[in-house]
Amino acid sequence: MLIAILGSMIYAVPISIICAVHLFPLFCPAEATVAPWIISFAFLAVCALFRHGSLKVRLIIIAAIVALSTGLLFAVELGENAEFFSERLYIALILAIAIATYIAGELLSAFRPLRIIVSALAFGAIIYMLIIGNDPGVMTSVMLLMVILVTIMREVQQLWEKEGDTDTRRHMVSILPFIILIALFVTVSPSSEEPYDWPIAHRIWQFAKDTATKISQFFSEGDGLEHVIGFSFENPSLASNLSEGDLTNLFTVSFSRKNTPSLNLGACAYNEFDGRTWSNSVGSGMISRRHPFDNIETLGYLNTKGADAVSDHTRYYNVSVTYSKLHTRFALLTTKYKDAYVQGKLVDTISDRDETIFKNGPEGFGTYYTFVAAALNKRHKEFIEFMKDTGKPLSEEDWIHSVSDICQLSRPDYPYEDYLSYIKDIKKNYCREVDISPELRVKLDELYEGCSSSYEKMIRLEALLSNMTYTTDPGPFPEDIDSAEDFVQWFMLRNPRGYCNYFATVMVLLARAEGLPARLVEGFHVSPTSSGGSEVTNRDAHSWAEIYFEGFGFVPFDPTPGISTDSVWQTTSERLDYLSSLSKGSLEAFTTGWEVDENTLLPLEPEPEGNSLALILIPTLMCAILFPAVILLYRAIMRRRFAGLPLSEKAVSLCHSNMRLLRFLGAKPAPGETLHEFAERIKEDLADGLVDFLFLYEVISYSDKTTDDEMLLALMRSNRDLSAYASAKRRIAYFFYSLFTM
């Protein structure tokens, strides 16, 4: 049975691992890292046991599943059943995947053409992804190679003319340890980013890569974002042509909540403006648009303000993006995000430019990644008050606490000195001085009058710009504008209208005029539909500003009229104030006739989810109850089967049972030893008469004598005597032996 189980798992395990790598991150909780894998492999083993196990094994598996299921139903309180099981629905999905992968493994084992086709597809997928630079991950690559290697070994075994033991499955299981060792070696071996050092190999590789890229671009229709309306990451101009072009779906965005606010998904950012165009001169170093330092700084600042600050001022939304006709090196993400995964791996931030890009080059049709977007309560009065204390770096103590305790990162990777250097680089790259004319300064001073912080000034500036005129035809761009100051003067005092690039540019420049580092970001504006998702076209291309507040991090501002990504929600203090403002009479209107203690009207802490002790004891108790029932049922079935057998088959069955008892007692035939020789050798070590059945077994096996009732009774007495002797000799071991083998 063990050979059969291992043989059926040869294909099922690699397929299961591939599915786990790509599917588990999509629906399993982020904190459940090891548990889904354990559940998957355990259930895969259960499927193999059920397929190849004996009747007793199958009954035990069914009883265990029934016991655990009913035990959980009894362990969880009735009112909490729906919530308890809905939160663990991912376990059912894991079990479904395990069943599907096991069935796939059995089909591959059974049908030769199918496994040859699948192995050929696996080999083609590896070559294609290798050429286009779409890294499937080490684990996926190794498992695909394992499927190919197992198929090759299987073909060799079938074509090999063997003598003696010709069981192909047994041979495959015997070489399985070597296949596993090869897989482990490939997995742990370091690999070079540039494995080819010969010029001829470079040329061949480049030709293959160019060909594969052209094929990929054929399906994704385009390379980069240049064809998108108003979007050019090389040289974005304020005077660019906004023709509508082809408005087909570029990519799809899905949200975990239907009430998710609109989001801006950025691709790249710019720091240099010459009055007409933006460019990016950010070099290598610690500056990057979505560098971890920004998240660490933000969470560190929130933590200094108390336990409620995070929920009062930030909200998180699960977002997934699927590329269709977009083919680009950029990963489209929000200003603040966490846990961005593409193909089960974290998206890499490249620091040599102010952008976040895919590590292995452009991604196209079918690319799927997920991340958690962070929204700020940035227009709330408490948040505006909350931002008054910005303007200085976090203290070293707060920074270290944020790195290690809040963000769970390694301190040596993010030392405090690097954080201070990070702030210095931000000011150097994003705070180029912008001079404001006296006329415009007077108007800005009137706008900012009464503001208690730089953040409040930016909120007012954003509101002012968002009330101007949006148009895709702002008129001719003056030829005499050749500096940032000229553009601000022209737009604010002579032509306050335009499209998103105009408003974002003015927002960035006026923020810098107040001494705040700021940058322009290009990407897409995404508005969720009623279904909780959105199809994005090139018409949704958009620009906005990101302004840096020292000690807190970057905050997005979108001054374009008619477009907003802001959402405002109630804070903890407001909820408590509202509850305290309720009159006693209004509460009594809902509690008339109740015997309610006054203390029960206060907000209560949520009760813990279920009883952890009951969740362990009740399923265990159910197993203990059902297990004896399964044993009794199995014995009843076996007695019924035994009663229906012909006399000769009954005798053989009893002989086999007696031989198993002898093996349990430590007596087994030597290689080439006859039953008679075996009986003569062991009869002195056992009680008289216990081995007499061996002489009958020899007669039944090798003579033409017909089995009669007297012979059957003798075998039954031998079986009873051997069982009693084994029980007396090894009582505890015999108890478990009788449960699982008899």
Image: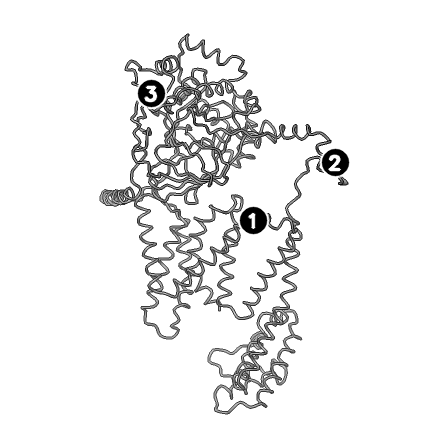
* Residue 464 to residue 70: above or below: above
SS class, disc 1:
helix
Are the two marked residues, 3 and 2, in contact with CB atoms closer than 8 angstroms? Answer: no
Spatial separation of the CA atoms under disc 3 and disc 2: 63 Å
Disc 3 residue type (three-letter):
Pro
SS class, disc 2:
helix
In the rendered structure, which disc, 1 or 2, sits on the residue that comes first in sequence? 1
Which residue is disc 3 drawn over? 474
Disc 2 residue type (three-letter):
Asn
* Residue 4 to residue 226: above or below: below
Which residue is disc 2 drawn over? 599
Of 194 and 506, nearer the camera is 506
Which class describes the residues within 10 Å of circle 1: few (<14), some (14-19), or many (20+)? Answer: few
In the rendered structure, which disc, 3 or 2, sits on the residue that comes first in sequence? 3
Spatial separation of the CA atoms under disc 1 and disc 3: 53 Å
Asked if residue 736 lies left or right of residue 527, the reply is right
In the rendered structure, which disc, 1 or 3, sits on the residue that comes first in sequence? 1
Q: Where's residue 512, x and y in %?
A: 43, 18
Spatial separation of the CA atoms under disc 1 and disc 2: 32 Å
Query: Which residue, as the protein is rendered here, is positioned at the far bottom?
Result: 705
Return the mark for residue 86.
1
